[in-house]
Amino acid sequence: MADKGSERQETVRLEDYLRIARERAWVIVVAVVVVVLIALYMALTTTPLYSASARLVYQRNDLETAVSGYGLYTYDYDKDRTIATLTAAIKSSESMAEAVKAQLGTADSAGTLMGMVGVSASEGSDLISISATSTDPDESAAVANAYADQFIVYRQNADRTAVAAARDVVGAQLATLSAAEKASDYGLMLQEKYETLRIVEAMQDGGFTLMRQAVAPGSPFTPQTKRNVVLALIVGLVLGVGLAFLLEYLDKRIKDEKTLERVSGLPVLAAVPVVGGKWRTARRGQRSHDVIGFEGASSVLLESFRTLRSSLQYFAVDGNLSTILLTSGLPQEGKTVTTVNLGISLALSGQRVIILESDLRRPMVHQYLGLDNQIGLSTVLAGKCSIGKASQQVNMDAFVPENEREERGEAGSLSLRKNLYCLPAGPLPPNPAELLASARMGQIISELKKMGDFLLIDTPPILPVSDAMLLTQYVDAVILTARLRASTRGEMEEVRSRLDRAGVRAIGIVAGGVRARTGYYHRRGYGYGYGGGYGYQ
């Protein structure tokens, strides 16, 4: 069982990752485009630099030993130490730079030439590379070769100077001898040694020979546009994915049904899609996706409310479920539209439905249904009229296509007109909470229950005001509505906490704003306008 649970969690995680990547694709694309454009800009505005290298090899010869029979070479060659010495000599020797300048006949200063050159060698290797960098490929090769030539000369002169110093010592000793002493064995030995050193001095080549000349490069080593663009693509992709997941982490909105169920602790009874429509909308300027009524038997919207209707029948198996309160956490989450469309759906199935508009702050049910609001719940609560006088029959023809009316009702369109009633809110009172908390409100709900098969109560949102919580004591169940990509985790947790503390039976939640193409959701406000009525801006 644990393995199955782990596998299920991993599947959910993978789906979440794919969803985030799909929904935040614009972030990834923007990041990639920006980074690539920066890389291209830098490549196009950076001056191309060319690098050429000449390679030298150290070949120590023992000609002085072959000539003299014993080693007279005084230079102690340690490759690692010598490479460091040579690097410093080449980089810092102004005299060598002047020699290179003279060889090339260039107008560049010695300092400029010193800044162009570099030396590298692998540890333990006999090879040394002298490289030169320039904006001109031919110049880079010429400088590298000139430095190689001058370095060989430099090493020759250094070695010859060392041998010459030894020869001068022997010559000084010979100068102190008399003619007789020069003719002695000792004198002859010094003379032989002197001649040997003279020959060895002439033979010194510095130990370094040119292995490969520098050749003018065909392309710059910087900027490497193709490589930089590829790296920019990778960096942009990583950055974009990171930003996408960061934004997702910071975004507390609920994005899908699984998250909604997990956060609210309630099953999703129905997923209502975003649909365009030509059907009746009451409020001026109301957006097209706030559809009241159904276009036909195959309507996607109708199918969603059929699912909700079936869910109610399932919950009614264990007991009475005729009085249902519909509410949401905050405004603009589809509770009123859900109430009205659920009432129409139940009426289409032959049920007698009463809709009670108990939102005495920002009522919208009567506008959706095209009803008069001069009298209603507020006037009944005030004792100014009866329930029968304030209740109004809803003309179902306004919400069902003409060619579908007979098909929708088992007894024809005449019966449909008698299936849906509404007690509108009436004039707005100054004290809505006090009226809803009165004993008279409970009596009204009890009387309305007897008038039909279902009583649907539309209330204000739970979090801004307490009106909905005052009515939960009179109902069989509560259905919440949430608009995915609008409702937040914190909101849903607080709503569920309040319902639990009050001991309210919440049977499920309706998810609104489903994208039919992907099954994911986005925020589409109903333009409900609760801000002023509930102190929310």
Image (cartoon, grey):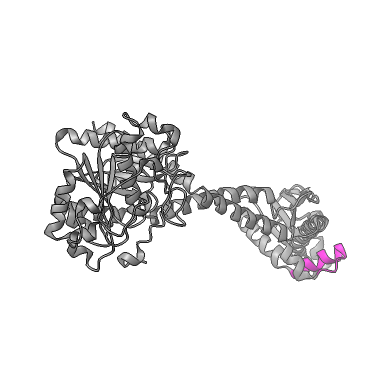
In this rendered view, identify the residue nearer to me: 422 or 204.
Answer: 422
Does residue 395 appear left or right of residue 451 in this picture? right
Residue 272: x, y in percent? 38, 42
Residue 174: x, y in percent? 79, 66
Q: Residue at left 74%, top 59%?
A: 133
Residue 128: x, y in percent? 69, 52
Q: How many labels does the image show?
A: 0
Identify the image quadrant of the C terminus: bottom left
Does residue 263 appear left or right of residue 67 in this picture? left
Q: Is residue 85 above or below residue 298?
A: below
Q: Quadrant of residue 265?
A: top left
Residue 257: x, y in percent? 34, 42
Q: Quadrant of residue 383?
A: bottom left
Does residue 495 appear left or right of residue 10 in this picture? left
Q: Residue at left 16%, top 43%?
A: 450
Q: Residue at left 35%, top 67%?
A: 532
Q: Residue at left 25%, top 66%?
A: 429
Specify the segment rendered in magenta.
94-108
In this rendered view, identify the residue nearer to me: 457 or 473.
Answer: 457
Q: Is the magenta stretch mostly helix, strand or loop?
A: helix
Identify the image quadrant of the N terminus: top left
Q: In this view, does 13 lie above or below 78?
A: above
Instruction: Report if residue 348 is visible in the image.
Output: no
On whether residue 112 falls in the magenta region, the answer is: no
Q: Residue furthest right?
A: 105
In this rendered view, identify the residue nearer to me: 160 or 323.
Answer: 323
